[in-house]
Amino acid sequence: MKISVIGDGKKEASMQIRSKRNRSRNIAIASVLTEDFDESNVIKALSSMRCYAILHGYTFEIVRETPQWRERCPQADIMFRRHCIISYVLPKYEWILFVDTDVGVVNPTRLIEEFIDDKYDLIFFDRFFNWEISCSSFLARNSTETVEFIKDFAEYERNLPNSFHGRDNGAIHFYIVERLIAAISKNEKKCREIWDRSKNYDDLFAAEACMRILLSENEQFNPHMKILSKGKAWVRDVFLTRGMWNWQRDFMLHGLKNQWLVRDKNVKLQIASHDLSRWYDPFTRLGFNESKCVAQSQIWHWDAELIVDETNLDVMLRKQFMKADNWFHKSVKEMQRSLINISS
């Protein structure tokens, strides 16, 4: 890696990445866009992901909605419709890594295969800043059961309560329990009542906390699905460390939307604050040339000041972990209050 000084005294790290991937497996990265989606808002995510896929020989399948797709997948909410679309795309590949459009690659030396576990058909992960099972990205193996699971999850839109339900991120907790745990307990029904009455994020997170407790009591709920714990997945939210990252620990970052990008690093962003969106740019330039990505001659450029060692990254993530843990216990108390109100 080369370190040089560019305009305004900023230190830039740059490197030409050579792929060492064994390309025997048919793996795709897939995203779904609405017809009117503005790609310019997530250009850093899309361009880095596209070059990464080309570099390592993954297919990057960007599915833009059409009237034909809307006929196949009539869900009202794109957050569910996209899962329906993925269920049709999956049979073309051995594995798919589904990603939100604002997920980008910060460390192109990592490979998707690091996170594939062939003992499982579906691999989800815990979001770091709270206790949600994330729907922003997941790994899915091509099997009849997996296709049905994803397609039926899209159909679960019909089961949403008339409340502040959290769209697919809220629904996934209830869908997993109802589909995969044979005997639905009274506790699940109580969690559902909290969800049914949800009016805000506090209520939603209380319902999700309720369901995570239930899932923890049924750890062997399904031998074909794995949920990775905090910090063990291929992606994390960029705001957790405000764009700072580490070569050994990081791969992809979620939340790379230009609307939340802070270009002036003199604007101080606090770690573990209530700000769950703003970030500094880990890249100094993104002039990716697809022919260079194919030839593996593309130079990647990063802000060297945002590349930190593991110790510093661990300190920042530890703050976020403690914040999430405290928040979880508060939500459990909120859940208990809600259950008392429901009972009365």
Image (spheres, rainbow, N blue to C red):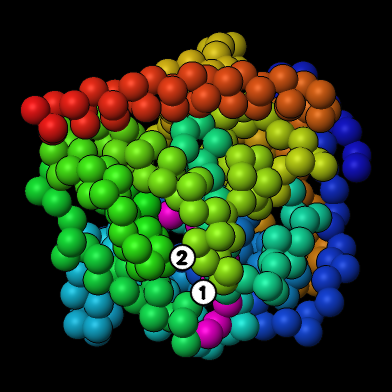
Residue 281 at what x, y percent from top left?
60, 33
Q: Decide if residue 98 is in sight here.
A: yes
Say which residue appears at 83% left-offset and 28% top-offset: 309
Answer above or below: position of 62 versus 104.
Answer: below
Q: Which amino acid does the dot numbered 2 rest on?
A: Ser
Residue behind mark 1: 61
Q: Which amino acid does the dot numbered 1 rest on?
A: Glu
Say which residue appears at 72% left-offset and 43% top-offset: 250
Quick one: 190 or 294, which is closer to the camera? 190
Say which residue appears at 57% left-offset and 71% top-offset: 224
Image marks 1 and 2: residues in contact by CB distance under 8 Å: yes
* Magenta residues, start to end: 135-143
Residue 264 at what x, y percent from top left?
56, 19
Q: Decide if residue 6 is in sight here.
A: no
Residue 219 at what x, y percent from top left?
54, 54
Which structural element holds mark 2? strand
Drawn side of residue 90 relative to residue 284, left or right? left
The picture quadrant where one finds residue 207 is top left
Answer above or below: position of 274 versus 300.
Answer: above
The picture quadrant where one finds residue 229 is top right
Q: Earlier in the sequence, mark 1 or mark 2?
A: 2
Drawn side of residue 181 relative to residue 162, left or right? right
Quick one: 5 or 107, which is closer to the camera? 107
Categorize mark 1 by other alpha carbons within 10 Å: few (<14), some (14-19), many (20+): some
Please give the count of numbered marks on the rendered protein.
2
